[in-house]
Amino acid sequence: MNLPAQDISCFARRRSQLLTWMHSQGGGIAVLATAPERVRNRDNHYTFRHDSDFYYLTGFTEANAWLVLIAGQEDRSMLFCEGKHPERELWDGVRWGPQAAAEHFGFDQAQDVSELDLSLPSLLVGTPRMFTILSGPNSPELLTRIQNWSAAARATVRGSRAVPHQWTDLSEVIAEMRLIKDAAELHTMRAAAAISAQGHVRAMQVARPGRHEYELEAELLHVFRKHGAQSVAYDSIVATGANACVLHHRAGNAIMHDGDLVLIDAACELDGYASDITRTFPANGKFSGPQRALYDIVLAAQRAAADLTSPAERWNAGHDAAVKVLTQGLLDEGLLQGSLDGAIETGAFQPFYMHRTGHWLGMDVHDVGSYREPPASNEDRPWRMLQAGMVLTIEPGLYVRRSDTVPEQFWNIGIRIEDDAVVTSAGCELITRGVPVEADEIEAIMRNHAIVSPS
């Protein structure tokens, strides 16, 4: 993706912010790599997707690229990337190349990645501290490379000009930076949410008994790509009937039957940012009495959680509120017995609601950031206070499987309602309400488009 020139400055600002933090730790050199290309089978690769931390600091989306930041007497930012290569570009597409990348993305210097192993040992000489990502899917290869560079540097120097003897993990500091979204990020996330909402509306419009799960998945993908999204944010969940009680059921060849509920958890990724929406609707366009009863409980739970999504509340307040509403609803419908406090204290609700009510959202669909006050490694810390600019999902649900202990009219009802919430100074903004959530509105959409066929 090529951002407009006026948007590129955000990446330089983030690098400057990280360099300032590195100085507070005594200075040193940071090395980060983007994600590697992965072979799918034989000479066929999976579609490349950049590493999120790397993109956050660079804006650079090509494979086989490295970022080097030097916090010293004179700060420097360096990019190592693939050089121009007419023959490879004929097959794989045009590359930025070091010179154009340095100019466009605002690096102090850029070099061909083939020079990385020659350049890094000399850069490590006399550097007090190494900063990198010490854990993550790309870390093993990265750490091996750093150890090799350190060994090469150590072989050339002695005494005070030794190589870094302290290693510091950048994961948490970058996560804290990414947790608060700026205006440009929020603009992109709202756009992604709007596209995803259109996909869900389309799926409701074409759904009817006799169709397969994969047909609705195809409708979603069509809308996402038609409106400019580069990818799905995660593998689409399209689940009909009993499949809706499987939390991560991938769209398959199951057929929607009259009387089934259909649960769709699907969204797009736009310009590196994820959206995340779940809606549940009746395959025949009309909720049954038991389905509507549980649906209204889940929707009430989502409202209760949204009401407590604000800078005045801690992260867990929304979850606790949702659990209270869901549990009371289960008691009212006879799916649980006893008192509200007792059912919550004993976890009696958990067979019907076994997940949390939300997660951070950003470049990753389950985005980085501690849910407790930093440091994240201390689980005794209180739940963190929400702040304006944070983005999270609000997604309560109820899942009632076939069981001798459950009234038959509730069997195989799986319901989840999920929206993306931007925390604001006054509360939260639900940015995914381009797709209806009220049961009556969902039925109206399906009724008015009952004869629509895929196109």
Image (tube, helix red, strand yellow):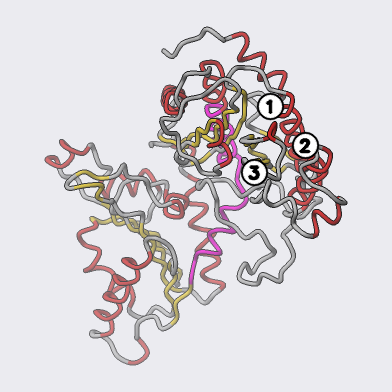
> Where residue 392 sits in the image (x, y, percent)?
64, 45
Q: Give me the C-alpha separation between circle 2 and circle 1.
A: 11 Å
- The foreground one among 101 and 350 is 350
Quadrant location of residue 295?
A: top right
> Compared with residue 289, is residue 386 higher up or lower down, i.e. above or below?
below
Secondary structure, mark 1, is loop
Decide which of tag 1 and tag 3 comes sooner along the chain: 3
Left or right of residue 40: residue 436: right
Q: How many marks?
A: 3
Of 345 and 304, which appears nearest the observer? 345
Residue named by callout 3: 403
Tell me which segment is drawn in magenta: 169-196
C-alpha span from label 1 to label 3: 29 Å
Counting residues from the start of the chain, the first of labels 2 and 1 encountered is 2
Q: Are marks 3 and 2 in contact (CB under 8 Å)?
A: no
Does label 3 or label 2 sit earlier along the sequence? 2
Choose between 373 and 43: the one closer to the eye.
43
Position of the N terminus by quadrant: top left
Q: CA distance from mark 3 to mark 2?
A: 29 Å
Q: Is residue 426 visible?
A: no
Please state which of residues 326 and 194 is positioned toward the viewer in this rendering. 326
Residue type of the residue flagged with mark 1: Val
Is residue 180 within the magenta segment? Answer: yes
What amino acid is at disc 3?
Answer: Ser
- Circle 2 — which element? helix
Q: Which mark is residue 161?
A: none
Q: Position of residue 426 (x, y in %)?
A: 80, 41
Q: Residues within 10 Å of mark 2 (few under 14, many from 20)?
A: some
Mark on residue 437?
1
Which residue position is annotated with label 2? 303
For badge 2, the amino acid type reads Arg
